[in-house]
């Protein structure tokens, strides 16, 4: 069985980050170790959330794992809680990267043109340092604009997306997948780029008229799980799109849906069936 480590926060309520990555990656038949970057009472869309930063735990956990001679097939990072922990995450990559280790960075920090409330204006430059060390990054359009300095647009053409993909790849990663890209009035999905071959690809699903926190984490976790199950990047991104759209649809149809997250749990049987 492949083993990965996911580095992101635990939001105790709210269905995002590790409480999404763990069940999805486990259901896909991949072992998921974790390093929590912070413990929050609930994700940051909840007014009054508490947050305990765990930066001082990253280096000692890494040191213990080195003593235990642990290794990982992939390292997947999401929400990082502060600029202080950026150096620790970068050192973790340097220590645990081996031949064949896949480093996936979801530069979680912003959406809909705005930084998340916990971050200051200096944070995107720090996140760009983490992206520089990745093999694959998975920003949304807002994060892409903050990482590259290119304008955030709600209306764009394919040329603008290609320019973004190239600017993101210039930060360092070989593969870039830009999420939340629209290709028409009712299509939403992902466009991606491989810097080494110069190839572009895309995959779109139905653009449903609802949005929920945590869907980016559902998407990224499914992508990482799929890659660990041996899928090509294009197939992994297609499954991640389909499962995320399916989770949103089930949430919209659910009588007891919550505003704070998607009912990805209901769609887990679909995800497992798609793995064959
Ligand atoms: O889903 C992204 C995310 C992760 N972690 C925390 C968040 C958010 C989005 O709001 O607040 C703590």
Image (cartoon, rainbow, N blue to C red):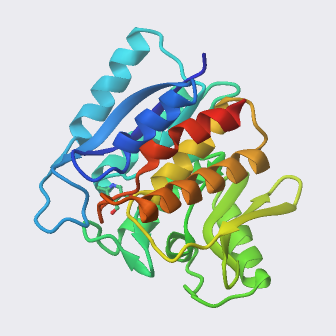
- Image quadrant containing the C terminus: top right
Inspect this view and state whether residue 146 appears: yes
Quadrant of the image where one finds ligand 1: bottom left
Image vertical order of residue 52 relative to residue 193, above or below? above
Task: Pinpoint residue 5: horizontal percent, then vertical percent.
Answer: 47, 30
**61, 259: nearer the viewer:** 259
Furthest-front residue in this view: 255
Task: Pinpoint residue 121: horizontal percent, then vertical percent.
Answer: 34, 75
Q: Quadrant of the rendered structure where residue 115 is?
A: bottom left
Furthest-bottom residue in this view: 155
Name the residue located 31 percent from the left edge and 24 percent from the top edge.
61
Name the residue located 35 percent from the left edge and 33 percent from the top edge.
35
Task: Pinpoint residue 31: horizontal percent, then vertical percent.
Answer: 50, 22
Name the residue located 24 percent from the left edge and 32 percent from the top edge.
57
Task: Pinpoint residue 205: horizontal percent, then vertical percent.
Answer: 68, 65
Name the residue located 69 percent from the left edge and 25 percent from the top edge.
99
Q: Give the total number of marks visible in the rendering.
A: 0
- Image quadrant containing the N terminus: top right
* Residue 44 located left or right of residue 141: left
Image vertical order of residue 146 relative to residue 58, above or below? below
**170, 108: nearer the viewer:** 108
* Residue 125 located left or right of residue 36: right
């Amino acid at each position: 069985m492949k083993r990965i480590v996911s580095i992101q926060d635990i939001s105790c309520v709210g269905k995002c980050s590790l409480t999404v990555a763990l069940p999805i990656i486990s259901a896909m038949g991949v072992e998921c170790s974790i390093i929590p970057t912070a413990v929050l009472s609930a994700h940051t869309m909840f007014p009054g959330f508490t947050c305990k930063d765990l930066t001082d735990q990253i280096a000692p956990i890494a040191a213990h794992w080195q003593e235990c001679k642990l290794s990982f097939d992939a390292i997947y990072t999401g929400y990082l809680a502060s600029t202080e922990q950026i150096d620790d995450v970068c050192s973790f990559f340097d220590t645990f990267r081996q031949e064949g280790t896949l480093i996936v960075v979801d530069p979680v920090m912003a959406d809909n043109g705005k930084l998340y409330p916990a971050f200051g204006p200096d944070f995107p430059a720090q996140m760009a340092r983490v992206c520089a060390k990745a093999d694959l990054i998975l920003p949304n359009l807002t994060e892409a604009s903050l990482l590259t300095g290119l304008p955030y647009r709600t209306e764009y053409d394919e040329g603008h997306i290609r320019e973004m993909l190239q600017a993101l790849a210039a930060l360092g990663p070989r593969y870039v997948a830009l999420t939340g890209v629209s290709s028409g009035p009712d299509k939403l999905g992902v466009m991606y780029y491989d810097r080494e071959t110069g190839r572009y690809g895309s995959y779109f699903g139905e653009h449903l008229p609802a949005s929920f926190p945590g869907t980016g984490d559902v998407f990224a976790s499914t992508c990482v799980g799929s890659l660990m199950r041996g899928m090509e990047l294009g197939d992994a991104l297609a499954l991640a799109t389909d499962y995320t759209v399916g989770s949103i649809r089930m949430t919209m149809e659910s009588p007891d849906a919550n505003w704070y997250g998607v009912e990805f749990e209901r769609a887990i049987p679909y995800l497992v069936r798609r793995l064959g």
